Image (cartoon, rainbow, N blue to C red):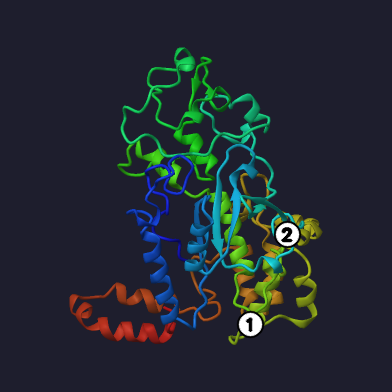
């Protein structure tokens, strides 16, 4: 998966935007990165022709059809438009290129409903149909979202990069009396419309904080506050960033449908695992070549029964077992939340796997490990005396002689997994 190294749109507004009509486009320093990337991608795919390449590329919505065609041909993919406005709070329409045959995709894998399509500037526009973000889902640091935004009647404007210097630009005259002096005009004029500005705890208009911008981009709080990143750099990073929720949405389609022609893939994400963890472990035990394997009379019954159900069904049996334990062992298996360790269930599962020397293990767990005398070695365990005795040599001469021979004998006893 190879995103292109650098946006086609430079930090100078209007490369492919509406702000400046005479931007340098592909001839500029930033725009020229794309042809280089397209050439690199093509040569890489030729060199690795036996591999299938997926990609996900993003750019602002282009205004000229010839530019759209140029990029699409370079990526060998057709663009669609997805907008973070679908999440309910902020606009961010973006073009996305991915190699998915959309004619074969019928349902949204997250909702299991039919994909909903529209059109924007004569290009297909895909709707995510996710639940809206609410103000209660966000850390607003004592501020309030604009009323119409909170009601989802309009959206916050798309995040942009701030002014290149800290001086910025003054806010519109009609708002200067209601804005703190440190809120110099760093952003495009529409960010300062009253319906797009938050209210702080004192009732003053303010811009979205970095913390809020991170959340609106689908990122964890503090994600951009790493190392020596400056306060001014963080909004710039977020203004240039992908919306993480949108990107994950589209990556899901790549994982499910981004396959070479002629191959098949699943058409939706399974809502639940096809096999429980218990079924998986029992099937693995069945294929073991070291004396373990399910007992036919109990395997299928246990495999179909979830562990919580087993715990409920054997509650009385477990209580009787617990009541017969010595007091000090009861203390070991008592949990702070009032539950007890479900050892009888563990024993049943191990028995179903034909666990060797299970009777010795069960005795040790229920009666306690003997501190003196003979020990239950269990399946494949090396006698503890063979390991410990060389560590307490009787003389200094023994230390210099036992090393290599002891290690060789120890490795022979414990096998290759030591």
Asked if residue 257 is positioned above or below residue 143 in the image, the reply reads: below
Closer to the camera, 375 or 176? 176
Q: Position of residue 82 (x, y in %)?
A: 60, 51
373 to the left or right of 114? left
What residue is drawn where x is 29% and y is 72%?
Answer: 392
On the question of residue 223 being in view, the answer is no
**Total count of labels:** 2
Q: Given this view, does label 1 or label 2 mark the residue nearer the observer?
A: 1
Local secondary structure at mark 1: loop
What residue is drawn where x is 53% and y is 50%?
Answer: 61
Counting residues from the start of the chain, the first of labels 1 and 2 encountered is 1
Closer to the camera, 53 or 295? 53
For label 1, the crowd category at 10 Å Cα-Cα, with few meaning under 14, some 14 to 19 and many 20 or more, is some
151 to the left or right of 63? right
250 to the left or right of 392? right
Closer to the camera, 357 or 124? 124
What residue is drawn where x is 43% and y is 80%?
Answer: 46
Q: Position of residue 271 (x, y in %)?
A: 72, 60
Q: CA distance from mark 1 to mark 2?
A: 26 Å
Write down the residue under mark 2.
Answer: 321
Q: Are marks 1 and 2 in contact (CB under 8 Å)?
A: no
Q: Which part of the image, by quadrant, shows the C terminus?
A: bottom left
Q: Position of residue 72 (x, y in %)?
A: 52, 64
Asked if residue 130 is positioned above or below residue 281 in the image, the reply reads: above
Asked if residue 413 is positioned above or below residue 17 in the image, the reply reads: below
Write down the residue under mark 1.
Answer: 292
What residue is drawn where x is 22% and y is 83%?
Answer: 401
Asked if residue 237 is positioned above or below residue 393 in the image, the reply reads: above
């Amino acid at each position: 998966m190879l995103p292109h190294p650098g946006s086609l749109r430079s930090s100078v507004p209007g490369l492919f935007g509406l702000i400046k009509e005479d931007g340098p486009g592909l001839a500029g320093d930033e725009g020229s990165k794309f042809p280089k990337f397209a050439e690199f991608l093509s040569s890489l795919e030729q060199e690795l022709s036996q591999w299938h390449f997926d990609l996900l590329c993003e750019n602002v919505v282009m205004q000229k059809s010839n530019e759209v065609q140029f990029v699409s041909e370079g990526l060998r993919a057709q663009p669609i438009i997805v907008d973070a406005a679908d999440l309910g709070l902020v606009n961010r329409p973006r073009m996305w290129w991915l190699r998915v045959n959309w004619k074969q995709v019928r349902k949204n894998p997250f909702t299991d409903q039919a994909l909903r399509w529209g059109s924007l500037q004569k290009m297909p526009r895909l709707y995510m149909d996710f639940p809206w973000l609410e103000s209660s889902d966000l850390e607003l640091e004592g501020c309030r979202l604009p009323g119409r935004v909170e009601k989802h009647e309009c959206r916050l404007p798309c995040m942009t990069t701030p002014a290149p210097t800290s001086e910025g630009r003054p806010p519109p005259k009609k708002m200067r009396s209601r804005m703190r002096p440190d809120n110099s005009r760093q952003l495009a004029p529409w960010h300062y419309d009253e319906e797009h500005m938050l209210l702080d705890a004192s009732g003053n208009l303010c811009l979205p904080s970095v913390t809020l911008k991170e959340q609106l981009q689908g990122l964890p709080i503090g994600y951009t506050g790493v190392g020596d990143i400056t306060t001014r750099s963080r909004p710039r990073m977020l203004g240039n960033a992908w919306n993480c929720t949108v990107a994950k949405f589209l990556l899901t389609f790549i994982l499910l449908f981004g396959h070479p022609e002629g191959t098949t893939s699943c058409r939706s994400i399974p809502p639940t695992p096809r096999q429980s963890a218990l079924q998986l472990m029992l099937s693995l035990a069945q294929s073991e070549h070291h004396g373990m394997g399910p007992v036919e009379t109990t395997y299928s019954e246990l495999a179909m029964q979830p562990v919580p159900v087993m715990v409920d069904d054997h509650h009385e049996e477990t209580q009787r077992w617990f009541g017969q334990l010595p007091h000090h062992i009861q203390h070991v298996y008592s949990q702070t939340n009032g539950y007890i360790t479900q050892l009888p269930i563990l024993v049943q599962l191990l028995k179903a796997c034909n666990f060797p020397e299970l009777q010795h293990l069960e005795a040790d767990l229920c009666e306690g490990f003997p501190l003196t005398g003979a020990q239950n070695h269990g399946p494949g365990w090396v006698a503890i005396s063979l390991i410990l005795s060389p560590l307490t040599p009787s003389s200094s001469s023994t230390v210099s002689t036992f090393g290599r021979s002891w290690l060789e004998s120890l490795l022979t006893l414990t096998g290759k997994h030591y």
